[in-house]
Image (tube, rainbow, N blue to C red):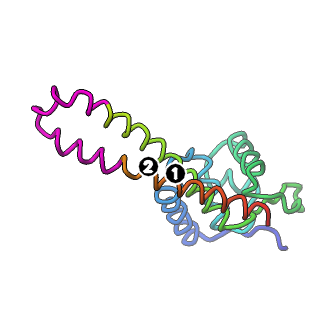
Amino acid sequence: MKEIQEFGPNVKKLEREVVQFIQENLFIGQKNAFSTIKSYFITRKYLTQGLLEKLTDFSRGTISQEINTMLTLGIIEKKRTSSTGEIIYALKSVEYGFLHGFLNSTKEINSLTEDVFRLKQEMEKEKQKLTDHEGFDEIFELLEAFSRTKPLLSLLLDELEREMENLNVE
């Protein structure tokens, strides 16, 4: 494996756009530092803490903390030490990286669904008082539709967790 190469300005700009797209669309509900660093691992094969510091403008402490979290979760692994003494890390699997993000986003949506379900129940209790308010029927229908997704989300979460376990075992 060669030393990590720097990208030119055009590729760096494109990479930042890809990282931003991944964060905004696939890693919903994850901490900014965590999702940014994980996104850079998806766009590159190997990274060091020093390069992540340059790419993200996060402090070395923040990067170290997130790398330790990713190591613990099995998202990345230590590959080797560079000629300058820095540890080179690699994403274990792009599939696992995306699946981990999707699982956490689904958990976030599921917790929101629980809040919506409670709100719908409260509205049902107070229906007599609230029905005269403009927009009640539309809001209630929306809450009801959203709360019906809860069983599906629970099944999806179970399946995603099983898949994560399978990928982690291999």
Q: Secondary structure at mark 1?
A: helix
Q: Look at label 1 and name its amino acid.
A: Ser
Task: For the residues labelled 2 and 1, say whether their Cβ atoms are less than 8 Å apart.
Answer: yes
Task: Check if residue 135 falls in the magenta segment.
Answer: yes
Q: How many residues crowd mark 2 within 10 Å: few (<14), some (14–19), many (20+)?
A: some
Measuring from the top left, give residue 35's x and y in whole percent: 59, 52
Q: Is residue 121 above or below residue 7?
A: above
Q: Secondary structure at mark 2?
A: helix
- In the image, what residue type sits under mark 2? Lys
In this view, the residue in front, 52 or 23, is 23
Instruction: Look at 48% across and 46% down and name the residue there.
Output: 110
Task: Identify which residue is drawn at 73% across, 70% down.
Answer: 5
Q: With 20 as the anchor, is 127 left or right in this view?
A: left
* Camera-side residue of 34 and 53: 34
Residue 66 pos. (x, y %): 69, 46
Q: Is residue 131 magenta?
A: yes
Left or right relative to 71: residue 85: right
Q: Nearer the viewer, residue 157 or 8?
A: 157
Is residue 68 shown above or below 40?
A: above
Residue 16 is labelled as none
Residue at label 1?
Answer: 154
Query: Residue 90 versus residue 129: which sits nearer the camera?
Result: 129
| Chain part drawn in magenta | 122-146
- Residue drawn 74% across the image and 61% down it: 47
Seen in the image, is 158 located left or right of residue 64? left
Q: Quadrant of residue 160?
A: bottom right
Please give the name of the residue rendered at 44% of the width and 49% of the height, measured from the top-left corner.
150
Quarter holding the N terminus is bottom right
Q: Which residue is mark 2?
A: 150
Residue 3 drawn at (x, y percent): 82, 69
